[in-house]
Image: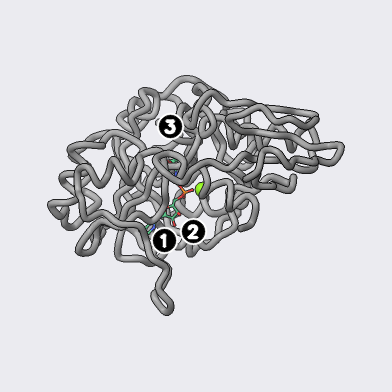
Amino acid sequence: MQTILTEDTNIAAALIRAGEVVAFPTETVYGLGANIFDEAAIQRIFQAKGRPSDNPLIAHIGRLEEVTLLAKVVPKMAQQLIERFFPGPLTLVLPKQPTISLLATAGLDTIGIRMPRHAVAQRFLQACGMPLVAPSANLSGKPSPTTWQAVQADLEGRIACILQGEQAEVGLESTVVDCSREAPVLLRAGALTLEELQAVVPTTRRLQSVNNEPVRSPGMKYKHYSPHARVEIVTDMNSLSPPANAAFIGLRAPNASFTRVQRCRNLSEYAHLLFWFFRACDEARVEVIYCEAVEERGLGLALMDRIKRAAHQ
Ligand code: TXA
Ligand code: MG
C-alpha cells in the first residue's frame, strides 16, 4: 500500500470516509484514526499497529455535541471536567452508547472520549464528520510518535495516509480518567495533572492496584514506550559512570561523558522531547539511555510513569 503524505485535511478526511486509516497530529502524540462506525476500518487499525485486540481505543471528537453520540450517560463530575478541560489532553472513560462497536472498546461497556485542542486535528475531525477511534500511531510496543516522520518510520506502507503537522507540543499521551463510577479515577497520568483535575473535582484519586480487581485500563498492562536501547533511571547525578555508547536526557548537565546529551529547560520540554529522543537514540544505535529522575508531582508524574515503563520497572 502506498502511504500518502499530505497537509490537506480534506484529502485525509476523504480517505477516512472511504474506510481507510489515517495518521494525524494532535497536541499529545500522533494518532491513527478510523471511522468509529466502520468495523472493517477499526480492524485495520489493529492490523496496522500489530495491536492486541483486548486493548481499547479512544474516540476522538471534533465537536462537543458528539459526547452524547458516544456516552450513554454523562455524570456531573464528567460534565465538570468537560467544561473545564475539553478540548485538551484529557480522555474521559464513560458508559458507552449501544451503537458503539465492542471492537472499538475491546469488549468493555465503557468508551474513552477525547477532544484534541490541536487546530489541524480539529479541522480534520470536523471534515470527517464523525468521531474517530485513534490509538497512538506507532507500531505496538514502540514509543508513541511525536513527529510525522516517526509515524512514517513505523507505519509506511501499512496505512493509507499521514496528515503532516508539526512536532507534537506535549509529547506524552493524554491523561485518562475513569468517570464511569462514583468518583473520577486516574487510569493514566498525562499532560493534564492530577492536581489540575482535583482542583475541579476534589474526589479524583489515583488508581490503587487491588488484587483480584480486573484491570481497569487494559493498555497499562502492556510494555510500552520502549526504545531498543536500555533505559537507566538516574537518581544520583554524582554517581554516573556510563559505558562508551550512552546518551543522557534530563534537566541538569551530567558530569560524565556521553555521546549524546539532551538538556531540557523544564518539565514541559522534558516531556516534549522524551519520545523523540528515544527514537533519535535508536537511530544512532545508542546502547543505553540515562534519564534523570524527577519528582512525581504535576507533569513529573506522567514523565516518570513513561520513563519507568521504558526502563521496565
Ligand atoms: O494522547 C492520547 O491519548 C493519544 C492521542 C492519539 O489522542 N492516544 C493514545 O491512545 O494514547 P492509545 O490507544 O495508545 O492509548 C489508550 C489508552 C490505553 O491505555 C487504553 O487501555 C486506555 O487508554 N483506554 C481506552 N479506552 C478505555 C476504556 N474504555 N477503559 C479503560 N481504559 C481505556
Ligand atoms: Mg499507544
Q: Is residue 151 visible?
A: no
| Residue 40 spot, x, y in % from top left | 46, 53
Q: Amino acid at mark 3?
A: Thr
**Does the Cβ of the disc 1 residue fall within 8 Å of ligand 1?**
yes
Of helix, strand and loop, which one carries label 2?
Answer: helix
Q: Which residue is mark 1?
A: 217
The residue pinned by badge 2 equals 220
Work out whether residue 229 can be spotted.
yes
- Queried on whether the Cβ of the residue with tag 3 lies below 8 angstroms from ligand 1, the answer reads yes
Name the residue located 43 percent from the left edge and 32 percent from the top edge. 26
Instruction: Give the quarter of the figure containing the C terminus.
Output: bottom right
Q: Secondary structure at mark 3?
A: loop
Q: Earlier in the sequence, mark 3 or mark 1?
A: 3
Task: Kindly identify which numbered label has been placed on residue 26.
Answer: 3
The percent position of residue 81, horizontal first and vertical second, equals 21, 44
**Is the residue under label 3 in contact with that under label 2 (CB below 8 Å)?**
no
